Amino acid sequence: MDTLVDIRGLSKSFGPVKAVEGVTFSVKRGEVLGFLGPNGAGKSTTMKMLAGYLTPTAGTASICGFDIVKQTIDVQRRLGYLPEGAPAYGDLTPLGLMRFAAGLRGIRGAEREKKIQTSVERLELQSVLLRPIETLSKGFKRRVSLAQSILHDPEVLILDEPTDGLDPNQKHQVRTLLQQMAKQKAIIISTHILEEVDAVCSRVIIIGDGKLLVDERPGQLEARSAYHNAIVMRMPAGDAEKAAKALSGMAYVAKVERVGQWDGFAQLRALAAGGTDILSTVHQAVSKAGVTLQQIHVEHGRLDDVFRKLTAKSRSKES
């Protein structure tokens, strides 16, 4: 895989406020990078610099080998950018917006209509194609903006909250589209929806206070969670006390949690010390105690748990 996005020590200050400070990472073709952080962490600022909207205070970055400051137009030719909030001209129709965007990119004639048709079909915009954008729902507005960002089939996509405002079916549709396109592109997605990371991202970066905190695969992040390899068990409510007693004090069980009780059944969770694989040990212990399990499964870990721990000290400031 070749590197399509390369960022080295990228920084941006607004007066005394350091919005982004010394961020370094790269994205290769075929990767979908989840770009996460709390509000004000510097995500949108970083994306705006990559798109040529803001000039860095320090550091360098290139897209497809072109410098974002010295060769901005070359960068923007190869970039699809979806900014925060899905801005669009409300009095235009989706068709009008895409024809306008195509014209700005020098795409005309039959090629323009073919590319518009492809984007419309990918985002299922046929039913609203001739309606003013200002009359559309938030979800349709988002999909229209996404359609114009992929219109020219760019090598790099930078998407700020691409599924914001979409219903579950529309989210699935967009995620599937991103997975299909990712094979030939480098995609950066900023999102607050952590399930999106599991759904489409091959890598995750978390920033806080404008600084890079972690750069790992989703599975590696999940392994940081206190719930990694936790065992969840469902049993008759009368057996819950026996099960909890059998597990308490075991060497590799860090904690036993009572999840809840309903319809005569109880659910317990045994947290694994150090993320150790404790499935067989736990199963043997509760069986030996005479507990009849109705269900047992292993948790992989929780990204929200890891996210909170990593960003707990981040200051609250505008990005």
Image (tube, rainbow, N blue to C red):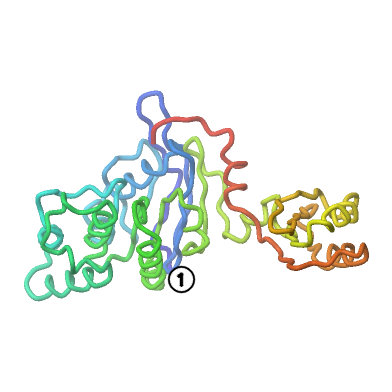
Single out the residue that lies furthest toward the right: 288
In this picture, residue 22 sits left or right of residue 266: left
- Residue shown at 70% from the left, 50% from the top: 226
Looking at numbered disc 1 in the image, what kind of residue is underneath it?
A: Met
In this picture, residue 6 sits left or right of residue 262: left
Provide residue 137's location: percent of width, then percent of height: 24, 53
In this picture, residue 257 sits left or right of residue 31: right
Q: What quarter of the picture does the C terminus occupy?
A: top left
| Of 56 and 194, the residue lying toward us | 194
Look at the picture and state if 137 lies above or below 319.
Answer: below
Single out the residue that lies furthest toward the top: 16
- SS assignment at label 1: loop
| Of 100 and 294, the residue lying toward us | 294
Provide residue 262's location: percent of width, then percent of height: 69, 55
Per the image, the residue denoted by label 1 is: 1
Examine the image and state in which quarter residue 296 appears: bottom right
Determine if residue 214 is in view.
Answer: yes
- Residue shown at 41% from the left, 38% from the top: 11
- Residue shown at 42% from the left, 39% from the top: 42
Look at the picture and state if 115 lies above or below 40.
Answer: below
